[in-house]
């Protein structure tokens, strides 16, 4: 091929790529100020000074927009049969002091209830105060904090969990059931937005509480009576709630309208312990306090909350004896007290040193780590990129499901360090290449420029691309569309077998735009094709896919339930798309394992990957698995509060194909590096764990064919 722009003749892809790389290197060497390929890939170039962070940033505000209800109850009446507490009021006071002294929240924005003030009516009224806040003082999506320290309990036989107010009396003055609390929070979210943090330092259940107390500890849970939450209780609160409309979503499968703030989408919950554990406070003469609140405040005083996300709390919070705090909610990736999600960044993994002196990086096969992957180790994020401790290179035999092990004497390894460090993947390992076909013609030169940019760089996000001359070998074809644009042909049989052959987008034939698309395509195909064939999981998991019907219970509260046949038939889900129908899934676990799970939708029409639910990252605390052996879990309806989803076909098409991919694991694992937005609508957005016994894990992929 004669390229007049370059005044050269090339006869193959290899000739052209070698020429472009050599030309770029010469240009870079002749211009010392030019940022290197690697720097541009990772954003390591110099930039303007960062804005203020932490306490400095919060104090710079004239009035931090945070509103709070803080409840602490020690002095329960003898008629309640509840043990008197000593640390709940001090805990609530400490939270209040932290908000006012450290975050500079004015007292007028905090409703404090202590002991006699924390009656059933008083607590409900405080929730309603948050609901009824109005501009100009309160603006939608201002952060809201609800903190409760006191007794919690569960009504026997009914499984209703409750907060126990100070005026609770068995069979006379009831506690506050979870359904009432949920309705109140949902009412707040409907009007004020879903930037709500709920912190509960109490037991979920009071069962066994008295038997676990001693001279140094008190349990924040009590025994309730079977009639303490009668049918119809608080019907005036529960009735009338109509969930608001959500925003956003993907084109193929998206969160269904009407349920964005329902259940765990209306707030993020931090609980002191797991469902079957007891929340405890230490009886100390000088300063009694709850173990959970004490650990949380210690974290906040060392790390400003605007620098951590909810799911990072359990990673950074000091260990609590006999308690495994939980973080629940769809928006765990938000920054504390802030409605904004963390911006896209290079993903970091925790590094620890085990008893044998080996380096353990919290990333493994499930994260896409393969033989030859390289990590650069740093003490912390602040030391990136100027002060690396050393490099680690993965070897096939040392890559586990969720961790990778490195010997201390490996070449370039860091010297032993105290505590933990972080690792950034700086070179990809051996992966399957994304094979693409491009005509060897002058008009496609920007495509080859984009490929050359990747081959000449280094880093974990580089495309694994192979140019193939035989179109039958390729998975993606790039073809001219007019004079200045290119389109993308789908050549992968798992999509073309259903009749989907062309993506409905074009991009300008310029290197930067093509570079973005190729990166997204490579990431998409890598994680779609990365499977683990665990037969016990493959054969022991049953997945059903249903249309959902909206219902209303006797209290006027909305819920959903499946209607019609299981749509997962003959190895695929096939849907005739409309604008109204919402969908959900039922997952039944017949394996011998209690499992965590995550589900992603891979949209072959635009290379987006959407998390339909989220698997919490592994921390020092045990996380309750949502899918127990011999049991079922639901998505889109049921107890987990995962929203339903709707289906759509991009404009201009009458058929689209995508894939539901499930990850099932025995232990939590951070999979936040997998989702990405479409490269055709914006730049890519992507966002750690330690196993010792190779926990069970597996994947299941379901094709989804959408028709109009």
Image: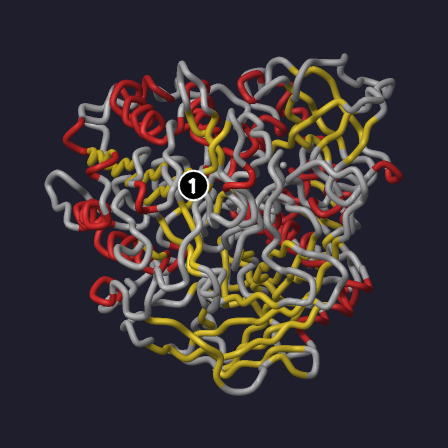
Residue 582 lies, with reference to residue 8, above or below; the image says: below
Which one is nearer the viewer's eye here, 135 or 354?
354
Q: In the image, residue 704 lies at what x, y percent?
A: 60, 73
Residue in the picture at 65% in, 77% down: 572
Say which quarter of the image contains residue 439: bottom right
Tally of marks? 1
Residue most extreme to the left: 136
Which one is nearer the viewer's eye here, 420 or 161?
161
Which one is nearer the viewer's eye here, 553 or 421?
553
Coloration mode = secondary structure
Residue 193 lies, with reference to residue 157, above or below; the image says: above
Residue most extreme to the front: 79
In the shown orientation, is residue 46 left or right of residue 81?
Answer: right
Q: In this view of the protein, can residue 533 be seen by the observer?
A: yes
Q: In the image, residue 189 lies at what x, y percent?
A: 28, 53
Say which quarter of the image contains residue 644: bottom left
Which one is nearer the viewer's eye here, 186 or 367?
186
Instruction: Residue under label 1, please give it.
Output: 202
In the shown orientation, is residue 421 left or right of residue 683?
Answer: right
Q: In this view of the protein, can residue 446 be seen by the observer?
A: no
Residue in the picture at 10% in, 40% down: 136
Secondary structure found at label 1: loop
Q: In the image, residue 394 lies at what x, y percent?
A: 81, 33
Residue 652 lies, with reference to residue 82, above or below; the image says: below
Residue in the picture at 34% in, 36% down: 337
Residue in the picture at 75% in, 29% down: 360
In the shown orientation, is residue 235 left or right of residue 337?
Answer: left
Specify few, some or many for label 1: CA neighbours under 10 Å numbering under 14, 14-19, or 20 or more.
Answer: many
Q: In the image, residue 464 lies at what x, y percent?
A: 72, 46
């Amino acid at each position: 091929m004669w390229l007049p722009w370059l005044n050269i003749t090339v006869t193959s892809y290899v000739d052209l790529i070698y020429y472009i790389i050599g030309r770029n290197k010469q240009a870079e060497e002749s211009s010392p100020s030019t940022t290197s390929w690697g720097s541009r890939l990772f954003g390591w170039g110099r930039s303007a000074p960062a804005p203020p962070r932490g306490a400095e940033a919060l104090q710079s505000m004239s009035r931090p927009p945070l509103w709070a209800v803080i409840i602490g109850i020690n002095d329960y009446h003898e008629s309640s049969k509840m043990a008197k507490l000593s640390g709940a009021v001090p805990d609530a006071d400490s939270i209040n002091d932290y908000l006012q002294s450290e975050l500079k929240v004015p007292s007028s924005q905090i409703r404090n209830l202590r002991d006699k003030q924390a009656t059933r009516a008083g607590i409900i009224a405080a929730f309603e105060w948050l609901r009824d806040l109005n501009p100009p003082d309160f603006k939608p999506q201002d952060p809201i904090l609800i903190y409760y320290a006191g007794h919690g309990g569960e009504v026997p036989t009914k499984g209703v969990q409750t907060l126990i107010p100070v005026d609770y009396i068995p069979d006379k003055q009831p506690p506050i059931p979870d359904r009432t609390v949920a309705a109140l929070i949902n009412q707040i979210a409907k009007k004020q937005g879903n930037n709500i943090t709920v912190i509960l330092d109490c037991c979920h259940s009071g069962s066994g509480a008295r038997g676990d107390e001693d001279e140094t500890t008190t349990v924040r849970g009590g025994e309730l009576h079977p009639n303490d939450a009668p049918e119809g209780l608080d019907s005036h609160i529960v009735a009338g709630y109509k969930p608001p409309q959500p925003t956003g979503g993907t084109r193929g499968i998206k969160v269904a309208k009407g349920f964005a703030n329902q259940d765990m989408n209306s707030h993020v919950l931090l609980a002191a312990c797991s469902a079957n554990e007891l929340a405890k406070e230490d009886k100390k003469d000088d300063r009694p306090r709850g173990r959970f609140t004490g650990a949380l405040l210690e974290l906040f005083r060392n790390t400003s909350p605007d620098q951590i996300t909810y799911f990072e709390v359990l990673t950074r919070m000091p260990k609590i004896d006999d308690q495994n705090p939980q973080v629940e909610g769809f928006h765990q990736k938000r920054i504390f007290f802030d409605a904004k999600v963390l911006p896209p960044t290079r993903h970091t993994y925790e590094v620890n040193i085990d008893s044998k002196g080996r380096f353990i990086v919290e990333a493994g096969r499930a994260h896409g780590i393969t033989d030859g992957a390289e990590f650069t180790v740093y003490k912390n994020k602040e030391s990136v990129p100027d002060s690396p401790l050393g490099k680690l290179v993965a070897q096939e035999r040392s890559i586990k499901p969720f961790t990778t092990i490195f010997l201390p004497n490996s070449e370039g390894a860091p010297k032993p360090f105290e505590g933990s460090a972080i690792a950034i993947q700086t070179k990809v390992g051996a992966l399957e290449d994304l094979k693409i076909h491009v005509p060897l013609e002058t008009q496609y030169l920007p495509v080859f420029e984009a490929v050359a940019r990747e081959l000449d760089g280094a880093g974990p996000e580089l495309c694994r691309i192979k140019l193939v001359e035989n179109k039958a070998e390729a998975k993606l074809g790039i073809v001219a569309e007019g004079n200045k644009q290119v389109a993308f042909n789908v050549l992968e049989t798992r999509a073309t077998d259903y009749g989907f052959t062309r993506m409905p987008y074009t991009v300008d034939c310029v290197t930067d735009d093509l570079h973005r698309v190729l990166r997204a395509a490579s990431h998409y195909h890598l994680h779609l094709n990365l499977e683990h064939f665990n037969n016990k999981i493959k054969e022991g998991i049953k997945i059903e896919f249903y249309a959902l019907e909206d219902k209303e219970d006797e209290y006027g509260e909305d819920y959903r339930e499946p209607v019609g046949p299981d749509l997962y038939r003959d190895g695929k889900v096939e849907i005739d798309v409309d604008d109204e129908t919402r969908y959900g899934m039922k997952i039944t676990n017949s394996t011998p394992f209690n499992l965590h799970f995550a589900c992603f939708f891979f949209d072959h029409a635009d290379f987006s990957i959407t998390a339909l639910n989220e698997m919490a990252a592994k921390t020092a605390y045990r996380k309750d698995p949502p899918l127990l052996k011999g049991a079922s879990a639901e998505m889109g309806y049921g107890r987990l509060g995962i929203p339903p989803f709707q289906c759509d076909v991009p404009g201009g098409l009458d058929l689209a194909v995508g894939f539901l991919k499930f990850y099932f694991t025995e232990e939590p694992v951070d999979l936040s590096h997998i989702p990405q937005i479409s490269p055709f609508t914006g730049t890519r957005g992507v966002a750690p764990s330690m196993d010792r016994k190779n926990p069970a894990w597996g994947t299941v992929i379901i094709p989804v064919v959408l028709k109009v």
